[in-house]
Image: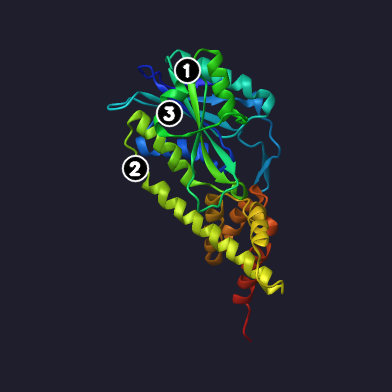
Amino acid sequence: MIKEIVAPKLKNPILIAAWPGMGEVAYRSVLFLREAMGFKMFAKLEAEEFFRPAAVTVEKGEIDLPSLPAGFFYYLKGENCPDMVLFLGEAQPPLEYAETLAFAIVDFLKKYKVQFIFTFAAKPEAIDHKNDSLVWIAATHEDVLQEFKKFKLKVLKKGQISGLNGIVLGTAKRKGIKGVCLLGEIPFYTVQIENPKACANVLKVVSEHLQLKLNLSPLQERGKFVEEEIDKLISHIKGEEQAAGTGPLSEEDIDKIKKDLATYTKLPQSAREKIENLIKEARTDITKANKLKDELDHWNVYKEYEDRFLDLFKKKKKKGKDPH
């Protein structure tokens, strides 16, 4: 299941693990750490028995089975910070396999004498997207909560942390390993949109606790951009409502718009940017339309872009028309 490429010599490393989830808080936080600190891959988790293909891929008419999701282990030997291991899972398996997968990861890392585990998650709250993203905490042991008390985090006194970002901590506790989950607040109506502000805030806690001295400004700037995009979307929806003759919007109307935003923003910002770039490329090179269609089908948003996609071909036809 786990293929080790190299066996780094690490001293009681800290594990930071993540799988995709709401607001992309967990996955993008660990992805940022990997890129910012120069972690190196040392092992790969191949769990074909836990994943089943839902479709086949087609390339130039030829059918093939798709590559199944995997997980990757990275390491960093710290100079002014502890040695660390990162784990990035490309996808969450069906829940019936989650505990088995989590035990496999924890058991593999026992030989490296991992002493502590960090995971991250999103905490949907009834807040506005311009509000600051507070950080909540849940830990495997009471003494861990006390250790993080200096950061003045909100304690998740009751509830649950769904998926492997929570389950891996439960399995680690059974193996005698302590850990903590840091949850970044996100608005309910943006659970399907990346939230760099929440990522920056949970990483700020990790950076201070482990003395990593992270430069979080790229995430903070990205957070401002995402806020502006949400503002534009709200303004657009409000404009459509007013154009329909409904008059000025009440606070109740605005609340409804915010709740409906998830429907209008089912794409992560990164995917939406890729699609927009492909549209631009296809305007000058129509052969790019196939790649664009594949991307739209991958995210199941062809209907949303159908008019713009078909316009690419209308313009090409019009350009090639004989004026005589």
Q: Is residue 259 left or right of residue 123?
A: right
Residue at (53%, 29%) from the top-left corner?
A: 71
Q: Quadrant of the N terminus?
A: top right
Q: What label does residue 215 carry, if any?
A: 2
194 versus 153 height, above or below: below
Q: Position of residue 185 (x, y in %)?
A: 53, 42
Does dot 3 land on a helix, a strand or a loop? Answer: helix
Q: Where is residue 113 in the image (x, y as percent from the top left)?
A: 42, 14
261 versus 158 height, above or below: below
Residue type at numbered disc 1: Leu
Q: Which residue lies under the disc numbered 3?
A: 149
Whole-Å distance between the Cαs marked 3 and 1?
Answer: 28 Å
Residue type at numbered disc 2: Asn
Residue at (65%, 25%) from the top-left corner?
A: 50
Residue at (55%, 66%) from the top-left corner?
A: 283
Of 177 and 47, nearer the camera is: 177
Q: Earlier in the sequence, mark 3 or mark 2?
A: 3
